[in-house]
Image: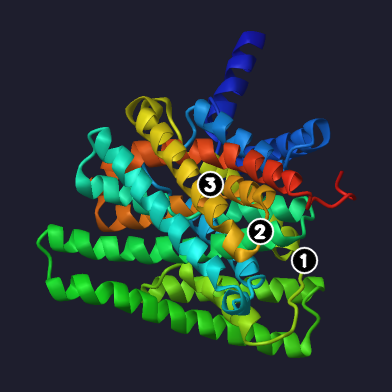
């Protein structure tokens, strides 16, 4: 009788609850948040490293367990998290860049153009040398142009860095992100032509994206400026309102086919350069933004796979070394004309190392337009992103310390 009772109980439990229980998406997200937060705090307190290193390590571990997003660029909810978190970081970065500096110090603009062009050429030549097709080598070179604003902003903010190198990093990262995104859109137009699509579309589509992105960026900047006249942007409610404005702008960007990278960056630039007011708000738009930023680095860190490393690891390593040397050589060699010391030039070149979410979003846009072509470069790009997100954070920290611009309070 007792045995029949147990069997009946187990049968009842099996009817009301599937066995074995399957974790849902919320559980996986929760575990990712816990792992990222714990590892971030551990490396910060135990080793004095930026928390983003711990976030990236959590992503690497998730992918090692087979739960990452190998070969395919993220879509759905993951892409939404990446877009929103990256938008906050790009908006903050843009709002720090004073373009008037380029008028008083024009050689800084020259340095930006040269380092971007030289890194493009270096990566292209290395990719061709390793047997990559001309179009694939061009795409890999375009994706390598931007230095990750996400990593640079996060590390500089956490270290409370301030000084000439910190400001120059922000300017160069903002500019080479603009170059990279625009070049990627032109490349997509070229791919349309290469696939026999309408030549008019190939020419007009990039122009349309730039125009729409500029209009939406202006609208976002105007809305934030209007809010700032009435509310204190540093309180919690205003922060949530700003977060909502950025999210709404991203929604409109997706609806009208703009660039989710250009809109927040251009909005921040517009806001900073149409007024003399210094814009101050909580880092990453408060707690909600902090959660999104943590998830951003965990997701990006989980994009690698062992198969991807085997297929594209050599190309990724060679391309990233060429990129590092190109950017470092350009800013070091040209720095004297813009008033920087050799030590500052070395620091600045090192700080341009990171490659992260910006390249991932650009790859995702290529995949949406030409999935077959994107698959050719995905192993190398995703391998490079996963490694350079981690190495780049350490490089930025080392660069800022070398420049002597880390706040004593942090130390």
**Residue identifier under label 2:** 340
- Residue 350 visible? The answer is yes
Mark 2: few/some/many CA within 10 Å (<14, 14-19, 20+): some
Q: Quadrant of residue 200?
A: bottom left
Classify the position of the C terminus by image quarter.
Answer: top right
Labels 1 & 3 near each other (Cβ < 8 A): no
Place of residue 328 in the rendered image (x, y in percent of width and height, measured from the top left): 53, 47
Q: Identify which residue is drawn at 35% across, 58% down.
A: 365
Label 1 vs label 2: CA separation? 31 Å
**Residue identifier under label 3:** 328
Place of residue 356 in the rendered image (x, y in percent of width and height, measured from the top left): 51, 48
Label 1 vs label 3: CA separation? 32 Å
- Residue 69 visible? The answer is no
Mark 1: few/some/many CA within 10 Å (<14, 14-19, 20+): some
Q: Quadrant of residue 402?
A: top right
Tell which of 103 and 285 is nearer to you. 103
Which colour assignment does the render follow?
Answer: rainbow
Tell which of 20 and 265 is nearer to you. 265
Q: Identify which residue is drawn at 59% across, 21% down.
A: 10
Under circle 2, the secondary element is: loop
Q: Residue furthest left?
A: 196
**Residue identifier under label 1:** 282
Label 3 vs label 2: CA separation? 14 Å
Under circle 3, the secondary element is: helix
Q: Earlier in the sequence, mark 1 or mark 3?
A: 1
């Amino acid at each position: 009788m007792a045995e029949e009772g147990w069997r009946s109980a187990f049968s009842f439990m099996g009817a009301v609850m599937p066995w074995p229980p399957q974790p849902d998406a919320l559980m996986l997200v929760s575990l990712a948040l816990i792992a990222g937060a714990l590892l971030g705090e551990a490396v910060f307190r135990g080793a004095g490293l930026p928390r983003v290193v711990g976030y990236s390590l959590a992503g690497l571990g998730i992918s090692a367990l087979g739960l990452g997003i190998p070969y395919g660029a993220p879509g759905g909810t993951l892409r939404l998290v990446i877009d929103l978190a990256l938008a906050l970081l790009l908006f903050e970065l843009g709002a720090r860049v004073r373009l008037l500096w380029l008028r008083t110090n024009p050689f800084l603009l020259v340095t930006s153009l040269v380092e971007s062009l030289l890194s493009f050429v270096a990566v292209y030549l290395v990719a061709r040398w390793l047997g990559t097709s001309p179009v694939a080598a061009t795409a890999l070179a375009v994706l390598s142009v931007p230095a990750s604003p996400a990593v640079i902003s996060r590390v500089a903010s956490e270290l409370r860095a301030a000084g000439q190198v910190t400001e120059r990093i922000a300017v160069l990262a903002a500019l080479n992100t603009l170059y990279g995104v625009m070049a990627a859109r032109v490349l997509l137009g070229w791919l349309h032509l290469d696939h026999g699509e309408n030549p008019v579309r190939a020419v007009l589509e990039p122009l349309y994206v730039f125009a729409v992105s500029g209009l939406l960026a202006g609208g976002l900047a105007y809305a934030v400026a209007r809010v700032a006249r009435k509310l204190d942007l540093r309180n919690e409610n205003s922060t949530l309102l700003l977060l909502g404005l950025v999210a709404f702008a991203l929604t409109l960007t997706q609806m009208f086919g703009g660039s989710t990278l250009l809109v927040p960056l251009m909005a921040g630039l517009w806001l900073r350069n149409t007024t003399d007011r210094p814009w101050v708000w909580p880092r990453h738009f408060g707690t909600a933004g902090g959660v999104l930023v943590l998830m951003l680095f965990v997701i990006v860190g989980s994009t690698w796979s062992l198969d991807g490393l085997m297929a594209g690891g050599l190309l990724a390593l060679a391309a990233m070394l060429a990129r590092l040397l190109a950017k470092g050589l350009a800013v070091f060699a040209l720095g004297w004309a813009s008033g920087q010391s050799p030590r500052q030039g070395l620091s600045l070149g090192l700080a341009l190392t990171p490659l992260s979410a910006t390249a991932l979003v650009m790859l995702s846009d290529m995949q949406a337009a030409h999935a077959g072509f994107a698959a050719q470069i995905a192993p190398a790009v995703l391998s490079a992103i996963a490694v350079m997100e981690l190495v780049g954070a350490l490089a930025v920290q080392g660069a800022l310390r070398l420049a002597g611009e880390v706040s004593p309070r942090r130390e």
